Amino acid sequence: MISRFVIPIISLVVVLSIISSEAQLSTNFYDAACPNASTIIRNSIRRAISAERRMAASLIRLHFHDCFVQGCDASILLDETSTIQSEKSARPNANSVRGYEIIEAAKRACPGVVSCADVLTLAARDASVAVGGPSWSVKLGRRDSTTANQAVANTDLPSPFSGLQVLIDAFDKKGLNARDMVALSGAHTLGQSQCFLFRGRIYSNSTDIDAGFASTRRRGCPQTGGDSNLAALDLVTPNSFDNNYFRNLVQRKGLLQSDQVLFSGSTASIVSQYSGNPRTFAADFATAMIKMSEIEPTLGQNGIVRRVCSAINS
């Protein structure tokens, strides 16, 4: 009687073992199904950044804004439908996050095989390298979500007006520690910000902002109007990945309040270390990006592989 159940039990164990082994991120996930995926995506990202260098910052930010909302599942790429409230229109993303079309172009590498979530992850790494930043090994095998979460996007994405403890708590919620947070914030060595996000800081006459820096920034950001006027987050080398962002913070020249607060309290020593040691910053940034890219990935039989990143059925 016992023998009747041996084969079914063994079969179940084998099936569960296969499912478990398949539901893992791996650096060679596409080696058989799409061996040239990484090369095709890398070349596509290089072309996009060559055409517009600012796009590097946008692609890194796009990946960040995806992973902080229900994990790294490409939910941020979904358009609004009768059943989906798109994350694109969430307060932190609307008229701000960009680069969607770059991901769609890169997605043409084996569209039915390589997930949009993996394209986003590879694109962030390749964007860093394209502007002189570090590279890192990317594990692949994420699946794409079938839904978005605008409400979580509105609550979980860090605000540029946040204080230090609020930021630490927001990152801790995603399994990232304070050092990870400071390293990832270093992505602001690239890119630009809109006037309405830093107006309060440059007109505050606060002791935590350099007077000359504030005066310079006021030229492009009036007290009223010009909300969408752009200013580089790093005034010195806005299109190159380096540690000038941290040097700026030490000099009280952080553009956003959420940047400058890093040079205070428990994280001030990390900022000081990165300001004097670009190699340490680059290494920690790569480590933090890996950790971020593995926040709650959708794996195995969960999720889908979208042929077009903006829609579920295409």
Image (spheres, grey):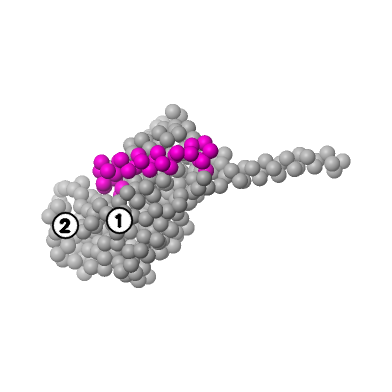
Label 2 with label 1: CB-CB less than 8 Å: no
Identify the amino acid type marked 2: Arg
Observer-nearest residue: 245 or 153? Answer: 245
**Given this view, does label 2 or label 1 mark the residue nearer the observer?**
1
Question: Which numbered disc, 2 or 1, marks the residue that appears first in the sequence?
Answer: 2
**Residue found 83% across the figure and 39% down from its top:** 4
Span highlighted in magenta in the image: 29-57
Left or right relative to 183: residue 140 = right
- Most extreme residue toward the right is 1
Answer with the quarter of the image where residue 14 lies: top right
Is any part of residue 89 visible from this angle? Answer: no
Disc 2 designates what residue? 217
On whether residue 50 falls in the magenta region, the answer is yes
Residue 52 point in image, percent of width and height: 25, 43
The residue under label 1 is 241
Q: Where, quadrant-wise, is the N terminus in this rendering?
A: top right
Instruction: Sort mark 1 into few (<14), some (14-19) or many (20+) by Cα contacts within 10 Å.
Output: many
Question: Mark 1 belongs to which amino acid?
Answer: Phe
